[in-house]
Image (cartoon, rainbow, N blue to C red):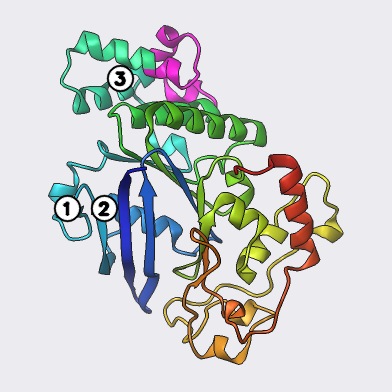
Amino acid sequence: MTELLEVRNLKINFKTDDGVVQAARGVNFSLEKGETLAIVGESGSGKSQTVRAVMGLLADNGYISDGEIIYDGLDLAKIDKQDIHKYRGSDIVMIFQDPISSLNPTMIIGKQILEAVLLHNNISKKEAKNKVLQLINQVGIDEPEKRYKQYPHQFSGGMRQRIVIAIALACNPKILICDEPTTALDVTIQAQILDLIKELQEKTKVGVIFITHDLGVVANIADRVAVMYAGKIVEYGKVDEIFYNPKHPYTWGLLASMPDVDSSEEDLYAIPGTPPNLLNPPIGDAFAVRNEYAMDIDFEEHPPFFKVSDTHFCASWLLHESAPKVNPPKAVLNRMIKYKERYGTNE
C-alpha cells in the first residue's frame, strides 16, 4: 500500500470565554491508499475536529497549536488557508452527517454536481453533463436524466446522501472523509450507503477516513480502527484486532454498550460517568475516573502505547508487565462472539 496521509502529534485548541479547550491532544494516525480507517469514540472525543483540521475547516476560534498533517509531501497544518483550497474539494473531500445542509435547495441536483465537475475537470459542458449523469448512475440512482432536473426536496434522505457522494467523487479525490454520514438514516438505508462507499472505494482506490460513534457501523467496512477518547487515540489496530481482541477498558465499554437485535434491556451496558472537561484535562489517563480497573498510576501519568501485535497498540496501564491480569467483562465477550458469528474475520 501507498501512504496517502500522515498525522503526527496533532494538537487542536479552541478559544472560549471560559478558557482554551484542548480538543485534540497529540493525535497520530496514517491512511494508506485504498484502505478505510475508522475513527470511533463518543461525542466530544475530538474525532470530528481532527478531520476538520485535515480539511482546513476548523471554526474561527479553533487553531492547530502543534503537530503535522503530511499530504503529498506538504504539511497542511502550516500552509496558508488560500493554498489549502488547492487540495480541499479536489484531492481531499468530506461528506457530512446531514446531506440537506450540503445541498442548495434552490438549485436542481444536476447543476450542483455539474459545478463540481467543471471546477475540477478541464472538459466541455457537454462532456461535463455526461459525467454528471454517469455519477448519478454510479451512486445507484435510477433515471439519471430525470433526476438531473429535480431539486433536493424531491429526494429521500438516503438519495440526497448519494448525491453528496456523487459531488465528492466528481473531482476524483485521493482521500474521502466521511463524518458520520449515515447517522441520520434508517438502518436499511444506512447499510446501503455503507455498501456504496465500500464499492466505490474498491473501484477508485480512494483512501477513506470514516468518523462514527458506533463501532457496529465499521464492523464490515473498516480495515483499521482508531478508538479516540478525550482528544487522544487510546487504541488502534486492524478491525479484527479491535473487535475480537480489544485491550482498552474504553473499547470494552463501547463494544458492550452497543445494542443488538438479540439484546434485552438487561443486557444493555452504559459506560459510567461522563467524559472529562477538556478545559482542564486530567493529569493521568483521562478515562481513569470511569474505569473500574483503574490503578493509582492511572491518576498520575498517562500510559504510553503498549504493543499488542505489529499492527495493534493500546494506551492502557493494564498492559504493563506489573499490572494485574484483567479480562474483558462478560458483556464484551458476548459481543465478541456475536460479531465473530456475524462477520467472521478478514484474515
Residue at 46% over, 87% down: 283
Sequence-first tag of 1 and 3: 1
Q: Is residue 145 magenta?
A: yes
Q: In this figure, which residue is indicated by the disc labeled 2?
A: 56
Q: Position of residue 119 (x, y in %)?
A: 20, 27
Residue at 44% over, 76% down: 278
Residue at 26% over, 23% down: 117
Work out whether residue 36 or residue 76 is closer to the camera in this orientation and state it.
36
Q: In this figure, which residue is indicated by the disc labeled 1?
A: 81
Q: In this figure, which residue is indicated by the disc labeled 3?
A: 111
Q: Over which residues does the magenta segment extend? A: 135-156
Q: Is residue 221 left or right of residue 177?
A: right
Q: What amino acid is labelled 1 in the image?
A: Lys
Q: CA distance from mark 1 to mark 3?
A: 27 Å
Q: Is residue 65 magenta?
A: no
Work out whether residue 252 or residue 54 is closer to the camera in this orientation and state it.
252
Q: What amino acid is labelled 2 in the image?
A: Gly
Q: Position of residue 217 (x, y in %)?
A: 60, 44
